[in-house]
Amino acid sequence: MKLICEKELCTGCGLCAARCPKHCISLVAEELGHLYPSVDQKKCIDCGLCQKACPSLHDTVCLYPSVAYAAWSKDEEDYRSSTSGGMASVLTHYFLANVGIVYGCTVIPGIEIKHIRIDNLKDAYKLKGSKYVQSSIVDVLSQIRQDVKDGTNVLFIGTPCQVTAVKRMYEEQPDNLFLVDLICHGVPSNKWLVDYIANTLKIKADKVSSIGFRLFEAYSLCVYNDDRLIYKSGNLWTHRYEDLYYNTFIDGFTYRDSCFNCHYAKPERVSDITIGDFWGLGNETDDNYIPKHPYGISCVLPLTEKGKRLISIVKDKLNIYERPVTEAINGNDQLRFPKKKNLRIKFFRRIHKYIGVDAAYKLCVCDKIVKYKIRKIIR
Ligand SMILES: Cc1cc2nc3c(=O)[nH]c(=O)nc-3n(C[C@H](O)[C@H](O)[C@H](O)COP(=O)(O)OP(=O)(O)OC[C@H]3O[C@@H](n4cnc5c(N)ncnc54)[C@H](O)[C@@H]3O)c2cc1C
Ligand code: SF4
Ligand code: SF4
Ligand code: SF4
């Protein structure tokens, strides 16, 4: 086996590596640090199991939401510390307190972004917050299979491509496996984040205990050393073009190639429940009856009967309001189409190898930077 799937479709989920009976697939960092499978030809027996597993080579059943909710957690502390309205957190708490275990994304000290297994409430905080970087799920795939086989109720929260990888481990989704996907516009690589923090911020990876990407309503990159904040970028919306990591992320310059061809950026969804930010709230019908929600609001789209049941169970932990499905979809680009690889991004991808990410990005958006600076002076 030379090529498992076309590079521009490979999401780096690692399911091929987890499935290979000869353990001859490793994920290797390529452009901008993104991981792609590499097959050790000497060990490969050409069994084809990797291609049979690969989510990018097969269609996955997706469902159109029949209802949409705007929601946020009634627990003030939980709400304040969540990225949107804390929907992921409410579901996580319900599972850990009552019925099972949760797999989600955390930052391991040393800047390793990966999915971990959580089986008790006191560790729920580890999953909180969006990490705007690709999380590795390779290590947890076999654990999930084992937990599901043992009859444990498992909640998996991740990007749609990760959810699809988990789903593809089964012919039919088991009753005790619950899947929640995030609305997702794309991911930079873990390696690029590590390089940025080391080379630009001059902070060694072993000094980093945690990283945050959203602080209440602000989009700020925060780096912590033992709970001490050692770097905080200005809010992206008031300090545009300052923090290179955040700006290249928000403009899509450092995404995986698969994100520009994302199979999952559409109204039909792969999971039991889709969650994200409710950006179009109030665009289609009056929302004046919804109380103030100063720290963001979750968009919640139940897809399956299982998803609907889960939401009805946790409803009393939420301020929750039904909204038109089209309002949710029309307000959020990633519920309609993938990020477009525009000319600026294409040019950046050609030149960053020669002049570096910083110079390449600034060159590609130089007109925007100048306009932004002039606007700031005038104001
Ligand atoms: C890379 C990325 C891109 C996103 N793009 C959009 C978008 O375009 N539009 C939109 O509406 N919403 C987007 N979101 C979702 C949004 O940022 C929130 O994660 C979501 O609304 C859940 O917030 P919450 O308050 O319910 O959860 P919180 O309580 O803050 O929990 C966050 C949950 O997300 C999971 N998670 C965090 N980081 C990752 C990661 N890197 N990979 C996989 N799972 C992760 C955690 O396991 C946790 O369960 C994106 C999220 C990520 C991680
Ligand atoms: S063909 Fe079989 S042995 Fe070869 S890489 Fe794929 S899964 Fe592994
Ligand atoms: S999409 Fe996943 S399974 Fe397919 S080749 Fe890429 S890493 Fe392997
Ligand atoms: S944009 Fe699509 S391919 Fe990229 S990380 Fe998100 S779900 Fe995966």
Image: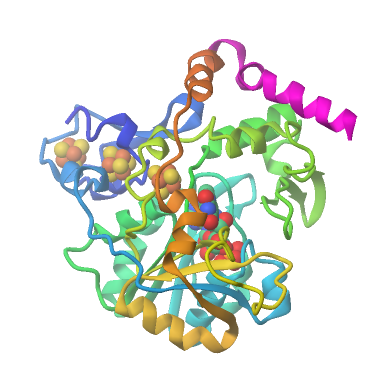
Q: Is residue 106 visible?
A: no
Is residue 237 placed above or below 320 in the rendered structure? Answer: above
| Applied colour scheme | rainbow
* Residue 335, quarter of picture: bottom left
Q: Magenta-highlighted stretch: main secondary structure?
A: helix
Would residue 173 be found to the left or right of residue 374 on screen? left
**128 or 106: nearer the eye?**
128
Would residue 51 be found to the left or right of residue 72 on screen? left
The boundaries of the magenta stretch are: 354-379
Which part of the image, by quadrant, shows the C terminus?
top right
Q: Position of residue 286 (x, y in %)?
A: 59, 72
Would residue 234 be found to the left or right of residue 314 on screen? right
Q: Position of residue 59 (x, y in %)?
A: 20, 51
Q: Which corner quadrant of the figure contains ligand 3?
A: top left
Q: Position of residue 20 (x, y in %)?
A: 22, 45
**In the rendered structure, does residue 364 fall within the stretch colored magenta?**
yes
